[in-house]
Structure formats: C-alpha cells, structure tokens
C-alpha cells in the first residue's frame, strides 16, 4: 500500500505534471549526519528517486558561512555514499548569483523591501500567535530605493545586521513565517567555497525553493518542522514563474525520533566540543560515522528506517528496534569466535604440559556454506569469571566444585577444586573426562556449556561495551548534560581466540554467549567494540 508521499508522486505522474521524479538530500555542512538523516536518504533516494527511475541530488545548503566547513562536507559525502546513495553533488553557493537575481526580481515586483529596523525590535514587531505584527516604517520604500540599497548591501557598504531584505507579504498572517520574513542578510564572513566574493547571504526559506527550482526538483521532501514554512516556499516559487514555470512541490514527513537519543546536530556538536565523547565518530554517538564505527551496516540502518514507517505525525521509536535489525543481520552473516571478557585461569590437571588437541567447529551455524574451522584446546585455558562459583546461586548451570560442564566444541570437564591468588581471584582446577569430545558418556551429565580460550595462543584485547549516552528522562532534567550516563562506556581487559588478532579492522564476529563485536577501525591497539548483545543477554559477571 502506498504511503502519502508515494500517493502524491503517483498522482503527479498520472496527471502529467511529473515525467521524471527528481529529489534532493539537502544537508547543511555544519556538523556530521546522524541516523535521522538516514531517513532523508531512504525517502529521497531509495523510496522515490530509485523506485521511480529518477534522480536524487546531494545538495549542500551552504548559505551560512559562519558555521560551515569543508570537514563537514567531506564527512557528509562519505556517509551518504556509505548508505548507498549515488548521484550528482551540488551546492547552494553555486546558485548565489541566480538567487540574487531572483531577489532583485522580487524587489522590482514590489514584493520585497530593505529594512533597517534593529533585529530585537523587528522580533517584537512580528507579533505573537494571537496578535498581528506591526508593519515596519521601511515597508513602503520605493522599488528604486530598495534596489539601490540592496545593491549597496552586496557592494559591502553596510555592517553585519545593519540592513536586511524582507519579503513583503502580510504582517497580520496567522502564520508567523509569512509576516514579512527576512530573506537576505549582511554577513562579512568568508565563505568556505566562495571566499570573500559575497557579503550578503540568502536565508534558507528563500534560497531553498529557488535551488530546488533551478535543479528541476519535482518533489522537495523535508521533515515536519517545515510544514509551516510551506506557504512561504510556495510564495517564493509562485512569484518567480518568469524563471521557473514548472515549480517544485514541497511535502513534509515526520522526523525519526529515538528514545534516549540526541537527534540534533547542534547538541551533538556540543558533546564533541565539550569533550563528553571521543569525537563525532564515537561509537556511542547516533551519527552515521559513529554507527559505522560501532559496527552497524548500511542495510541494517535502512531496514530500521523502513520499518519505522513514513508518517505525517511525529512518534518515537525504541532503540531496541534498531538493535534488532543489526542483530538479525549479523546472526546470518557474522562468523563465531570465543572471547573471555573477565578471564580466570582453568587448568586441566590430568593432561601434561604442552598438551594440545584440535577439533572442528562451525564458522556460522546459520550459514552451513561458511564451512568449519579448527579450534585447539590445551592444558591451560581461560574462562569467564562468572562461569565459576564456589557457592553457586539457585539454578546455576556452570562450574562449581564437583560439577561437570562441557567446554564448548570440546570435552566435558569436572571441577576438582580451585586456588586463589593474593587478591582472591580463583584459579580453577579440572579433570578432563575421557571420551567426551563431541559426545557424552554414561554416568556423566554436564550441567551446562561454557566458552573458553586456549591460554597458549590467545590474544589480549580491549572489549568496549557501549550503552545509551543518556539516562532515561526523569521529568526534571531537561538538559542532556544532566542526563549523561556514567556507564555509557565500560572497558574489559579481555582474551580471545587467535583469529581475533588476525582479523582486519572493521571485521565483525559473534562472541559466543556474549554478543556481536567489531574490530575498531581507528585504534592501533587490538580493540573490539560491542555492536549489540545477543537476544538473551549473557552476563559476564
């Protein structure tokens, strides 16, 4: 069943208004993209342009040079291409001259005027939701004077904020966005692409519909906060039909909101600037690059966005929905490995020093075509601290003195005792039960199965467990700085199979009984980031 955006497009194709669907992804290069922007990629590229055999531009809204930078441009291109987008890259700044010509045409039509009202007073004169605004004394300037002043603004004769160009619409409009909005401002700040060529810049609400029209965008699809801006969008293109006889159509969809997740570039930048995270690609961040470093895949993110749905009303998703998408994918694709996060030593006392025996195990039980690999058990092993208890809790199914367990993929062992070091950490002593490699023997019943690594050839690594950056909202603390989760990163000094040290950066594994992990792409040391836990989470302690 078609959603409301598809219904609009289908109707426009049927009545001949649209021959080729052309959309755009319009990020502002003032920060890195977050998962909310993945929804824009999904809608504008996959759901519309690709589905209808059209085109989707990546157009940078670089009309505010005070906040924009090449670093953000390059990061956004990387992220959008990683999500699968292909197409033409354009820049709003490439259209500054045409946008300036459009502003002059609006002035010549008597639909815009230069205003010298101080900014604070101008805000007061806009009125409220229940009171109409007040007209500026500059509103009735002549067309000739407005053209002269606007050209002088471009020539650099005025200081920042001294003059603005406003659209002349309706100061009594119930939509405050239509109360003579500012469409150009003076700003003597070099542009990262245009240098010092310009000292006046168009505001988004004026520039965006013009850019869409220049590029032949048929459907300008944006998030719901722009719904009240649509009348202004339409006012701009309707009054520029000399330039754009077939104007684009704006439609709005609900943003992607996720519980306990910051979905604002401004706040995410604050986290980075205040050093609360390790950069934009910190795996706790909901940025695309952070999710990539965390081990999420483009397909899992796009699946999540698709399943979240396309609606007109805002709603909030659970982060568990996103986790379920990557867990399902990795269950089918990730090779298995064993790693011990809180290691204690285990010695098989009825085997000589140097003893080693190999067996085979499936690389991925969900994918028989992946084949099998060899694992080696030796006299000295490491097991999880939580897999041994001197005094076990009720229903405990792991190692205790006198109990039997199976070493995953290998023998059954019996705990014959333990020793403790100077800090009380146990060293578990076991006997191997003959004839139990891959089979059972009469009279021996294992209580459970535990994972392990061979002490003689294991690797040391750092396992990073990530949790939500924010604590749940308590109804009191509005500022995210007061809701930072002190346990959003927990680090384990772990031991793992040799293959974990040989894997390329970015390789993902399921650590048996623990969760899905990816080798960190940035760390020189051996580091694995937990992507997501298993559906039934195993506790290391």
Image (cartoon, rainbow, N blue to C red):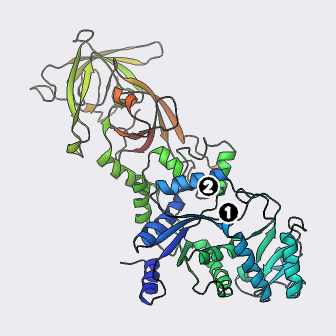
Nearest to the observer: residue 527 or residue 345: 527
- Residue at the spot 67% in from the left edge and 42% down from the top edge: 275
Q: Determine whether 133 is above or below 497 in the image.
A: below
Q: Determine whether 415 is above or below 19 in the image.
A: above
For marks 2 and 1 on the same chain, the one whose residue lies earlier in the sequence: 1
Q: Circles 2 and 1: CB distance less than 8 Å?
A: yes
- The total of numbered circles placed on residues is 2
Q: State how far apart marks 2 and 1 are (Cα).
A: 9 Å
Q: Determine whether 299 is above or below 272 in the image.
A: below
Q: Which mark is residue 62?
A: 1
Look at the image and tell me whether residue 497 can be seen.
no
Assign the C terminus to one quadrant of the image. Answer: top left
Tell me residue 208's x, y (percent): 65, 73
Tell me residue 24's x, y (percent): 54, 69
Look at the image and tell me whether residue 443 can be seen.
yes
Tell me residue 254's x, y (percent): 53, 71
Label 2: few (<14), some or many (≥20) within 10 Å? some
Quarter holding residue 363: top left
Tell me residue 298's x, y (percent): 43, 54
Q: Is residue 540 left or right of residue 275?
A: left
Q: Could you say whether the residue bearing mark 2 is in a helix, strand or loop?
A: helix
Q: Determine whether 406 is above or below 235 in the image.
A: above
Question: Residue tagged by mark 2?
Answer: 73
Nearest to the observer: residue 473 or residue 511: 511
Q: Could you say whether the residue bearing mark 1 is in a helix, strand or loop?
A: loop
């Amino acid at each position: 069943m078609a959603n409301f955006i598809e219904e609009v497009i289908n109707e426009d194709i049927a009545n001949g208004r649209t021959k080729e669907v052309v959309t755009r992804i319009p990020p502002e290069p003032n920060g890195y993209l977050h998962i909310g922007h993945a929804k824009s990629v999904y809608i504008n590229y996959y759901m519309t342009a690709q589905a209808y055999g059209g085109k989707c531009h990546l157009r940078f809204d670089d009309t505010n040079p005070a906040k924009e930078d090449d670093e953000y441009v390059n990061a956004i291109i990387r992220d959008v291409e990683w999500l699968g987008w292909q197409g033409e890259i354009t820049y709003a700044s490439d259209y500054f001259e045409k946008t300036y010509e459009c502003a002059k045409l609006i002035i010549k039509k008597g639909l815009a005027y230069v205003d010298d009202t101080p900014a604070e007073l101008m805000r007061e004169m806009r009125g409220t939701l229940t009171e109409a605004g007040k007209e500026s004394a500059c509103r009735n300037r002549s067309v000739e004077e407005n053209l002269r002043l606007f050209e002088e603004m471009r020539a650099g004769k005025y200081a920042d904020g001294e003059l603005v160009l406003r659209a002349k619409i309706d100061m009594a409009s119930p939509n405050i966005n239509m109360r003579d909005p500012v469409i150009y401002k003076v700003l003597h700040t070099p542009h990262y692409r245009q240098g010092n060529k310009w000292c006046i810049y168009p505001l988004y609400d004026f520039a965006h519909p013009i850019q869409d029209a220049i590029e032949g965008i048929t459907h300008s699809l944006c998030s719901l906060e722009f719904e009240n801006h649509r009348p202004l969008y339409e006012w701009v293109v309707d009054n520029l039909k000399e330039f754009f006889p077939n104007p684009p159509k704006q439609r709005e969809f609900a943003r992607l909101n996720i519980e306990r997740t910051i979905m604002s570039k401004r706040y995410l930048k604050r986290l980075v600037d205040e050093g609360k995270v390790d950069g934009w690609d910190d795996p706790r961040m909901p940025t695309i690059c952070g999710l990539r470093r965390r081990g999420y895949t483009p397909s899992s993110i796009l699946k999540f966005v698709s399943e979240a749905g396309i609606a007109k009303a805002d709603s909030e998703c659970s982060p568990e929905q996103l986790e379920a998408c990557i867990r399902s994918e990795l269950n089918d694709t990730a090779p298995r490995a064993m790693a011990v996060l809180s290691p204690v030593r285990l010695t098989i006392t009825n085997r000589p020093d140097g003893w080693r025996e190999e067996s085979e195990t499936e690389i991925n039980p969900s994918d028989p075509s992946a084949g099998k690999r060899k694992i080696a058990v030796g006299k000295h092993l490491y097991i999880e601290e939580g897999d041994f208890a001197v005094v076990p809790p009720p229903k405990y199914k792991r190692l205790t003195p006198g109990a039997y367990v199976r070493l995953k993929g290998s023998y059954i062992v019996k705990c014959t005792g333990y020793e403790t070091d100077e800090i009380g950490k146990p060293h578990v002593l076991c006997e191997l039960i003959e004839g139990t490699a891959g089979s059972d023997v009469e009279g021996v019943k294992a209580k459970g199965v535990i994972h392990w690594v061979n002490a003689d050839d294991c690797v040391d690594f750092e396992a990073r467990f990530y949790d939500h950056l924010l604590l749940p909202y308590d109804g009191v603390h509005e500022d995210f700085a007061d809701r930072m989760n002190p346990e959003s990163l927990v680090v384990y000094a772990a031991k793992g199979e040799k293959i974990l040290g040989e894997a390329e950066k970015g390789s993902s594994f399921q650590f048996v009984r623990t969760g899905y992990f990816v080798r960190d792409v940035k760390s020189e040391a051996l580091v694995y980031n937990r992507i997501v836990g298993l559906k039934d989470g195993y506790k290391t302690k």
